[in-house]
Image (cartoon, rainbow, N blue to C red):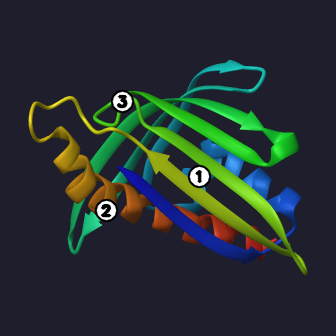
Amino acid sequence: MKTIDRITLRSSLARAFQVASNVERWPEFLPHYRWVTMLSRNGKGGLVEMAAWRPFGLFKYPTWWVSEMTVIPGEFKVLYKHVRGITKGMDVEWSLTDAGGNTVDITIVHEWSGPRWPLIGKLAADLVIGPVFIHAIASRTLAGVKSHAEQA
């Protein structure tokens, strides 16, 4: 399973990267995030627990995962390796690039072989988890990061 989400925003690259990589502050401006907690830290990031809502009309489905997060400031990248939750084993890369004229392109790539469910794991990832959950949450996250970064 591979999902790619992109957005362009009007901001400096430094500001956009600060908003995108300071995940503990996400629940302050991303209403679909229930919480983000750094469970441990190292010099490049740490172990981060995240929980978000996936809305379906009036109904909100709770999601949760824990990732090893690595922030690479010189490359304007944030990498995640999901280590707990249904998406265990998923690799996520946030890449921010200067698009010129005080605009920034942000791309999020999620790659995963799916849950270890016999017979249906890959199908579940390709047909439901990726497009229905991951893309829906990532697109909302990008829209919120855009809005917050552009407010400065």
Please give the label number shown on residue 26.
1
Q: Amino acid at mark 1?
A: Trp
Q: Is residue 135 above or below residue 129?
A: below
Quadrant location of the C terminus?
A: bottom right
Q: Amino acid at mark 2?
A: Pro
Label 3 CA crowd tier, 10 Å (few <14, some 14–19, many 20+): some
Tell whether 139 sits left or right of 44: left
Are discs 1 and 3 less than 8 Å apart at CB? Answer: no
At mark 3, the secondary structure is: loop
Residue 52: image x %, image y %? 39, 50
Q: Is residue 50 visible?
A: yes
Q: Which residue is mark 2?
A: 131
> Which mark is first along the chain, 2 or 3?
3
| Residue at left offset 67%, top offset 20% | 41
Q: Amino acid at mark 3?
A: Lys
Question: Marks 1/2: CA distance?
Answer: 22 Å
